[in-house]
Amino acid sequence: MKNGYQQILLLLREHTGVDFSLYKTTTIHRRILRRTVLNKHNTLEQYAGFLRGNPKELEALYSDALISVTSFFRNAETFAALQHKVFPKLLQQGGDEPLRVWVLGCSTGQEAYSIAMAFTECVERSSHPRKLQIFATDLSGCGGSLWRRTAATASSSRCGSRWCLRGRT
């Protein structure tokens, strides 16, 4: 017999097709505990029983598990490396085909837009112009509406008026 945590992960996988066992254990466990308490259950086993045959709560847990912790240029060191090491090398290679970037887990679009902005700034300093194609994906299906709200409230000083249209949602 599986423990409550494992039962919940299995129910989530059966309902959504997403295997949360590969997620950071402390994060997913904290999200499960939050939903357990919200639904007034004392144990994970009780909550697992509650989830069986309860698609509405499975969706709520799934939504909670897809945490959208993001911001423009969230990891400054990574973006500095992209702009000063990676992008210049890629631009020096030349070619007519656009460079392609796949951004995973970008529920609000901020990561993809940050890459586009950083690349554009790098291209402007380069003698080898090149186009960029970005493919941005996320498990969450509501990214578009989140992006519209996020763009209107972007607080990064780097975004400034050049990149973000404030107040237009």
Image (cartoon, rainbow, N blue to C red):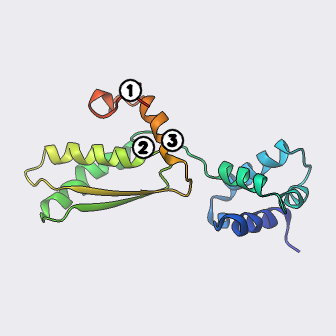
Amino acid type, mark 1: Arg
Residue 133 appears left or right of 4? left
Of 91 and 149, nearer the camera is 149
Q: Helix or strand or loop: what does disc 2 sit on?
A: helix
Q: Select label 3 or label 2 by which is in front.
A: 3
Q: Position of residue 168 (x, y in %)?
A: 40, 28
Q: Quadrant of the N terminus?
A: bottom right
Q: Quadrant of the C terminus?
A: top left
Residue 117 appears left or right of 23? left
Q: Which residue is mark 1?
A: 166
Of 31 and 135, nearer the camera is 135
First in sequence, mark 3 or 1: give its number: 3
First in sequence, mark 2 or 1: give its number: 2
Q: Which residue is mark 2?
A: 110
Amino acid type, mark 3: Ser
| Residue 154 visible at all | no
Q: Which residue is mark 3?
A: 145
Report the Cα–Cα distance between label 2 and label 1. Answer: 14 Å
Amino acid type, mark 2: Gln
Query: In the image, what residue occupies the spot 46% across and 41% down?
Result: 147
Farthest residue to the bottom: give it: 1
First in sequence, mark 3 or 2: give its number: 2
Q: Helix or strand or loop: what does disc 3 sit on?
A: helix
Q: Residues within 10 Å of mark 2 (few under 14, many from 20)?
A: many
Query: In the image, what residue occupies the spot 14% across and 43% down?
Result: 124
Report the Cα–Cα distance between label 3 and label 1. Answer: 15 Å
Residue 97 appears left or right of 12? left
Farthest residue to the left: give it: 127
Q: Helix or strand or loop: what does disc 1 sit on?
A: loop
Q: Is residue 141 above or below residue 99?
A: above
Q: Residues within 10 Å of mark 1 (few under 14, many from 20)?
A: some
Q: Position of residue 72 (x, y in %)?
A: 41, 39
